[in-house]
């Protein structure tokens, strides 16, 4: 075996070892077993009170469906909804007020964004403070582009009460119809589960914590004991930051669901890229060294096996092909959840390459002062300012 062949075979072997670890040593995340429609708990004898808090900024295109789905909840206990209209320039608040069932809805006009706060967190903080005046047992934090089946709230509460959980969070079913969505969206959930294996998150003996911001049922007293929303006022990845603080207060649960879904489609690759790049560099702690390591790791994990397999270069090609097959197999449960062809599993090397590019794009956006851009606000600036102040 020549020196070049030895190097290629070593690279192929490293890729195979990485995937063997991911398949066998990462909490079996790829099986996607943590779902809210499996092992459903019994309903409580007493239904606790709940207030839903929804921040909204220029959401006129989806607000009727999202708020409408909350107002239509089949929940036996006391329930109301607080919509924080975060200085929208459209008819977000007006549309919400005109919906059937609006007697259970309060539309709160958001105050101007203070320095040091991320826009969403400031809106959520105002909503939670308003909701807490009536001391509800739980607060449901949900986004303005999420629709809920009528049974979703009662299922969330039943799980929280049965497990005495301080947080029940659902990774909602993301919109997955366009070509860009079919290529990239299931992988987004797959990568999230890989980074934060749901089984480990749900294990009280492990410190790992994560949440999915589209649907988070929070025990109010635990939230207050954790310091409230103000403790994560500058967080870009606010759901995981909040979950980390709440897990210190008690057990949490994170799972997949078909009972809540994203209402807004991603029209093309650019919109998906922007969604990913908004927080990718924040996940790396804004570290250039972690960025470099991530790019190298993604290349070794996703790109190298496919390239070696296609090279037809002896043992390295055989090992690369085996690794490519393993990664395709690991993707199958997520593809079934999204009702896509199993052949999409073969696209993981390409998908990994694209997500690497999105991560680099995220870093460039931060370096250019446009990090975490959302609704006209560069949200990474608040976190970077807080980091500088703490040094």
Image (cartoon, rainbow, N blue to C red):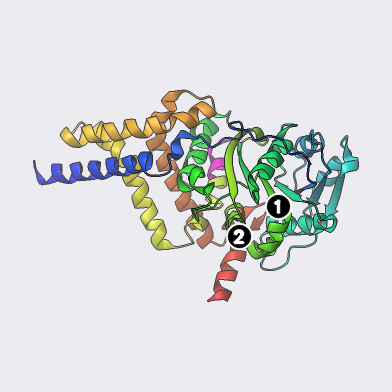
User: Between marks 1 and 2, how big is the CA–CA gap?
Assistant: 20 Å
Residue bearing mark 2 = 235
Magenta stretch encompasses residue 138: no
Among all residues in the image, which is located at the extreme left?
1
Residue 255 showing in the rendered view = yes
Q: Which residues are magenta?
A: 266-273
**Mark 1 secondary-structure assignment:** strand
Q: Position of residue 77 (x, y in %)?
A: 82, 40
In which image quadrant can residue 125 be found?
Answer: bottom right
**Mark 2 secondary-structure assignment:** loop
Frontmost residue, 303 versus 188:
188
Magenta stretch encompasses residue 272: yes
Identified at 25% across, 37% down, the residue is 308
Residue 372 showing in the rendered view = no
Q: Position of residue 346 (x, y in %)?
A: 38, 29
Residue 219 numbered mark, or none: 1
Q: Position of residue 225 (x, y in %)?
A: 68, 63
In which image quadrant can residue 161 be found?
Answer: top right
Left or right: 242 as drawn, with respect to 107: left
Residue 287 numbered mark, or none: none
Left or right: 276 as drawn, with respect to 304: right
Frontmost residue, 131 versus 2:
131
- Looking at the rendered image, the disc whose residue lies closer to the viewer, 1 or 2, is 1
Predominant secondary structure, magenta span: helix
């Amino acid at each position: 075996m020549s020196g070049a062949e030895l190097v290629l075979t070593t690279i192929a072997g490293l890729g195979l070892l990485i995937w063997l670890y991911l398949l066998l040593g990462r909490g079996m995340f790829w099986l996607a077993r943590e779902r809210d429609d499996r092992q459903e708990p019994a309903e409580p004898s007493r239904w606790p009170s709940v207030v839903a808090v929804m921040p909204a900024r220029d959401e006129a295109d989806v607000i009727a469906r999202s708020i409408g789905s909350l107002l239509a909840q089949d929940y036996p206990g006391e329930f109301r909804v607080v919509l924080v209209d975060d200085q929208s320039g459209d008819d977000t608040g007006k549309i919400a007020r005109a919906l059937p069932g609006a007697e259970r809805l309060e539309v709160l006009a958001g105050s101007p964004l203070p320095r040091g706060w991320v826009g969403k967190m400031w809106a959520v903080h105002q909503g939670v403070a308003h909701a807490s005046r009536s001391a509800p047992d739980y607060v449901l934090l949900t986004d303005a582009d999420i629709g809920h089946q009528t049974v979703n709230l009662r299922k969330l509460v039943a799980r929280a009460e049965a497990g005495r959980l301080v947080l029940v969070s659902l990774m909602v079913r993301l919109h997955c119809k366009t070509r860009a969505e079919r290529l990239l969206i299931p992988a987004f959930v797959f990568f999230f589960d890989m980074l934060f294996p749901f089984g480990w998150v749900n294990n009280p003996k492990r410190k790992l914590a994560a949440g999915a911001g589209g649907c988070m049922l929070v025990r109010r007293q635990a939230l207050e004991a954790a310091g409230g929303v103000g403790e994560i006022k500058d967080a870009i990845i606010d759901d995981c930051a909040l979950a980390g603080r709440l897990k210190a207060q008690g057990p949490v649960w994170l799972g997949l669901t078909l009972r809540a879904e994203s209402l807004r489609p991603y029209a093309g690759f650019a919109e998906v890229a922007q969604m990913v790049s908004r927080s990718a560099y924040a996940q790396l702690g804004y570290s250039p060294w972690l960025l470099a390591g991530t790019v190298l790791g993604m290349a070794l994990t996703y790109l190298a096996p496919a390239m070696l397999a296609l090279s037809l270069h002896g043992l390295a090609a055989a090992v690369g092909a085996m690794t490519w097959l393993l990664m395709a197999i690991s993707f199958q449960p997520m593809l079934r959840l999204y009702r896509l062809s199993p052949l999409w599993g073969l696209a993981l090397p390409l998908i990994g390459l694209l997500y690497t590019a999105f991560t680099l794009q995220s870093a460039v956006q931060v370096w250019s002062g446009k990090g975490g851009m959302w609704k006209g606000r560069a949200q990474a600036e608040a976190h970077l300012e807080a980091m500088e102040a703490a040094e």
